[in-house]
Amino acid sequence: MDVRGDRVRLDRPHPHPRYAEQRVRLMFDVVVIGSGLGGLSAGALLARAGLRVAVVERNAAPGGYAQPFRRGPHLFDPAIHFTLDAGPAGFIPGVLDHLNVADRVEFRELPQTYQARFPSLTVDAPPGRLAFLELHQRLFPRQADGLARLFELRREMFTQFAALPQHVGPGGLDAAMAAAPLVFRYRLSTLTEVLDEFLDDPQCAAAIGSIWPYIGSPPSRMSFPLFNQMLETLHHGTFYPRGGFGTLVDALAAAVRDNGGELLLGDEVRRILVEDGRAVGVETAGGTVLHARAVVSNADARQTFGELVGWDLLPTALRRRVDRYRLAPSAFVLYGVLHADPAELGLAHENFVFGSWDHDAIWADVQAARPGGIWVTVPTLADPELAPGGGHLGVVTSLVRAGADGSWRAIRDAHADALLSTVEAGVPGWRDAFEIVDMATPDTLFRYSRSAGGTAYGWENTPAQTASKRLPHRTSLPGLYLSGQWAEEGTSSLRTLTSGRATAAMVAADLEHPTAIPDFGGPSFVNELLTGARQ
């Protein structure tokens, strides 16, 4: 029996009084709202499982923050600068191989994890956990023993996470806690709290926490489990796709289409249809009604619940929970041409620029609308073809408070000038060598994604807003699911992809196909276990 829903056109009115003025146009098993990586991966996997899928995207092209753009001959990735777990046996190649589109994406491993520039010290972080540890022990010899103990804790905690099952039966929580004590001990810790157990040199602690701008919170606010999983995955290599991340978007979009799914571009979902207390499809701004057995939203969770469903149809407790969440920062980004040899400037592909050893002071700058949480990317070191005429491209990213109200146009030039001055202090020669060709503000990010405030990470990645504290994939409205950075896995390109897989597995199981979506590995927060521990 073909499990795909029939595509039908009906002339009769919708059977439910709430939508009596509409007409059912198309029927699917699953409708996905938004074609960011979390939505595309969920849609592609469900289509590959034999379900009829429609992915609805308001923009003219799929991809969300992963959709590249051109300025003249130059190709820029707007937000993603590398990804993780993309080696030969990694999660991302495993998904692409399952979808029969692995030949469309060629990942290249970067030779250096990142560079972090502090006053009077530059840290060139290599791949490999042992090499990373030994580098920091050489730079901070008095902290060598504490670093060794910290890294042993990190390794063991990562191992315990990986060994825990995704689901436990009745009475299994006690056994899980006994098998993974570090997971439960540190599940609500910040990075600073853990670093303070092992290190007494604030500069060494600051160096270990260098990746915090990638996560959007300084060490004093950042979830230690999230930091640990990200850094441990970084130790296994960072990767960039030849031709930019648009090739990954195109591969996932092709997988949707090749497996009988549809991509409906340039038409925004106006509301999620609810019948008898269940999500039964969507209506688009263009008037198309897509009836479905399940709806997956990759959109902003506040928008999903408050605008597309309506709070009147949802539990009061859910609204209270969502209202308590704090948004992660947005970003201010400069895209340009680098008229200099990156090697002469001492640059790697990814370069953090810290004007202070005090990450909390930098966070205060971000909150006060001053440049902070800055990194410089030279994507042509990974792929020279992004600038086909030769030379190099540069991207400067600075965290800013989430807030997209249309006011950035008046202040963006001044902010860009201040940002270039800050980068120049850490990378002498940058200002003269860098020619801006475009810039993005929170207003820009909001136009791309409709994410509240133009946030780049969804909810802020504090201990109270990660793992089980984030929103679950299955919502309190039957038939409605969440995918992407607002849901359990959270922030980063890899995590949104794993979120898409997790959502697809739940939808397939609920539509009576429990084994249709393979487990490709990837990061997990073992959410059900942590939820039980919290209770």
Image (cartoon, rainbow, N blue to C red):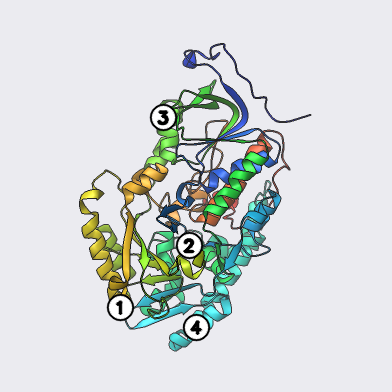
Q: CA distance from mark 4 to mark 2?
A: 32 Å
Depth order, front residue of 267/280: 267
* Residue that mark 4 sits on: 135
In which quadrant will I find the N terminus? top right
Q: CA distance from mark 2 to mark 1?
A: 25 Å
Kind of residue sitting beneath label 4: Leu
Classify 10 Å Cα crowding around label 1: few (below 14), some (14-19), many (20 and above). Answer: few
Q: Under tag 3, what secondary structure?
A: helix
Q: CA distance from mark 2 to mark 3?
A: 45 Å
Nearest to N terminus: mark 2 or mark 1: 2
Residue 190 position (above or below residue 442): below
Count of marks overlaid on the render: 4
Q: Residue at x 37, y 82 (%)?
A: 121
Instruction: Please identify, in this view, whether the residue under mark 1 or under mark 4 is nearer the observer.
Output: 1
Instruction: Please identify, in this view, whether the residue under mark 3 or under mark 4 is nearer the observer.
Output: 4
Answer left or right for 142 relative to 355. right
